[in-house]
Amino acid sequence: MNIPEIIFNDKNLVVFNKPSGLLSIRDNKHPDEKTAIDAACEFLKVKQVYPVHRIDKDTSGVLIIAKTPIAQKKMSEIIFNQAVRKIYLALVRGEVKKDNKINLPILKTMSGKVKIDKAGKNALTIYRIRKKYRGFTLLDVEPKTGRTHQIRVHLARVGHPLA
């Protein structure tokens, strides 16, 4: 397996630049597909590592994996308490007029689909315009909560789906 670029590695954590197309963690839909967890185990020459968070399969970005359960617990607390800022680049359809935020609840249905629904969990996304193009806008997007497909669902709802 090709091991993604290592950004950071110490006694507690290994941090990868996860490419698009690589699962973070094995799921029921792809039981035999290689994952970033597999890559971490191969790189570290260990049988087990501990995921701190996930990134969608089709999204590239920084992925933190703990080497011990204690490091996993501590990093999970740091992320839960929003002591880490997560900022994504998103190219969206349409010309966004101004920086804004989206505060709409997201519900994960029994089938695994996600949608905006008042019965869902609180979800907050902040976005800032980085560059405008004809018919598109490049945004810096900061999800303040970590709901499944949050960025995709929120931006689509306000009329700017991911391109």
Image: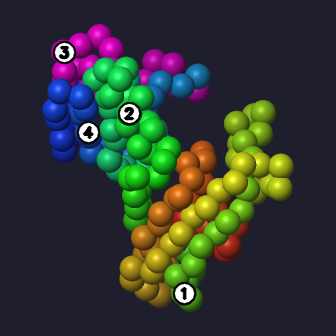
Q: Identify the residue position indicated by label 2 in the image.
A: 74
Query: What residue sits right under mark 4 in the picture?
Result: 15
Q: Is residue 89 above or below residue 132?
A: above
Find numbered disc 1 in the image and state the secondary structure of the residue it sits on. Answer: loop
Q: Residue at x 40, y 58 (%)?
A: 85
Give the vertical position of 85 relative to 31 (above or below).
below
Mark 1 burial class by Cα count in 10 Å: few <14, some 14-19, many 20+ = few
Q: Earlier in the sequence, mark 2 or mark 1?
A: 2
C-alpha separation, residue under disc 2 versus residue under disc 1: 36 Å
From mark 2 to mark 3, how far is it between C-alphas? Answer: 23 Å
Q: Which residues are magenta?
A: 29-49
Residue 10 in the image: x percent, y percent?
A: 16, 32
| Residue wearing tag 3 | 45
Callout 4–callout 2 Cβ contact below 8 Å? no
Residue at horizontal 38 percent and vertical 33 percent from the top: 74
Residue type pointed to by label 3: Lys
**For the residue marked with disc 2, what is the amino acid?**
Lys
Query: Is residue 139 rendered to the left or right of residue 16?
Result: right
